[in-house]
Amino acid sequence: MNTDRLPSAACAPGIEAAFVTPAELQARVRAGQSLLGEIHFGEALAGAAPGHPRARVGMGQFNSPPRIEAWFSAQPVRYGQRGAIRYAHNEQALFGCVALSEVTPARFETTVHDCYREILRLVDAERYSHLLRMWNYFPAIHAVFSDLDRYQSFCRGRFESLEEYYENQFDQRLPAASAVGTQDGDLVIYFIAAKTPGEHCENPRQMSAYRYPPQYGPRSPSFARATLKRWDGADDLYISGTASIVGHESLHADDARAQLDETLQNIRALIDRSAHDHGIVFRGLDSLTHVKVYVRRAEHFETVQRHLDAVLGAGVERLYLHADICRAELLMEIEAIARAR
Ligand code: 3EB
């Protein structure tokens, strides 16, 4: 493990991600970092449920050895639970996670709605009322039930909850997000919230997702393209899942390499716009610290990895996942974190 990159307690951002093996996770905890939560991809969870948030997302990963997405705090952490939601918090941030099994098709949208309502109530009650970043994972994303596919049902459930809560502040308060299809397992939602607000960022190459026209579903996807958070110690840009979409249309159906280039163009444009609008010095793709790459078809993994290795610095942490992207023609999606200090 590269210990140079462990933050010093004197200048500690609110919360930090790392894609680690179980041994690296333990080493960080021994080095004095507090674990906020851990998300496993593909592999079954071992041992009894721990006191901190932990979930398994049912998608395979291409990394070898497999990695855990772990969230750490340099400050002490307290743990809590509200209904099915487990959470951990420090002075600045709260990390929460919920996994729900056996969501029947007829109940899926209501489950999402209820789940979001509980998350919004929790973060308000704990006074971390600013949601910065949400991850949403569920199986059978393309399955159709009463005229909507599961992604569209998910979007409607999420929208109704967020609109109820945010009312006329809806556009400004939406967090960055990813919503991705798994091969199996639970509906898993995890999130980062903060005591003080983040800043909402949109992409000049893309229509805001919350304004997508109705052809994509009765309720548009409720997320910001990115959230900028000025932690004490660092400015982090949480970049939502980004795909080969320009305006609101998917481009380059059936061409994985072209989709990757378009996606990288979108990420560059988003970083540049956020830097410009918020007066922060991001250095394009060189400011990325973490990328999570969702690849629909295993046969595309090597091409995607080879090209990303050529454009990303060696220090960028990468997690490659085998997943269904919400629109059938999309072959990949990339989410990321960029940092300026
Ligand atoms: C897109 O740009 C691609 O519904 O939360 C990316 C990130 C996508 C988040 C979400 C969907 C979501 O519309 C899909």
Image (cartoon, rainbow, N blue to C red):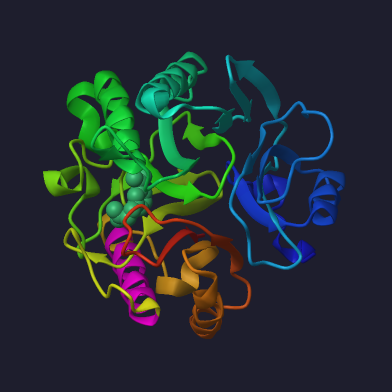
Camera-side residue: 318 or 217?
217
Q: Residue drawn at (29%, 20%), measured in percent from left and top?
A: 165
| 88 vs 272, nearest the viewer | 88
Asked whether residue 200 is drawn in magenta, I would say no
Q: Residue shown at 22%/41% (left/top)?
A: 220
The verdict on residue 261 being magenta is yes
Question: Which of the two residues, 189 or 287, is positioned nearer the viewer here?
Answer: 189
The quadrant where residue 320 appears? bottom right
Vertical comparison of 172 with 161: above or below: below
Question: In the image, is residue 320 above or below residue 38?
Answer: below
The image shows residue 114 at horizontal and vertical percentages of 41, 19
| Residue 112 appears in the figure | no
Instruction: Work out whether residue 203 can be spotted.
Output: yes
Which stretch is magenta? Answer: 257-274
Q: Position of residue 181 (x, y in %)?
A: 46, 49
Q: Quadrant of residue 39?
A: top right
**Which image quarter holds the N terminus?**
bottom right
Q: Is residue 271 left or right of residue 311?
A: left
In the rendered image of this protein, does residue 272 appear above or below residue 91? below
Q: Residue 318: percent from the left, percent from the top?
A: 59, 66
Q: What residue appears at the point 46 percent right and 23 percent down from the top-left corner?
A: 119
Is 54 or 224 nearer to us in this picture?
Answer: 54
Residue at 18%, 58% in the rendered image: 248
Q: Position of residue 289 (x, y in %)?
A: 55, 64
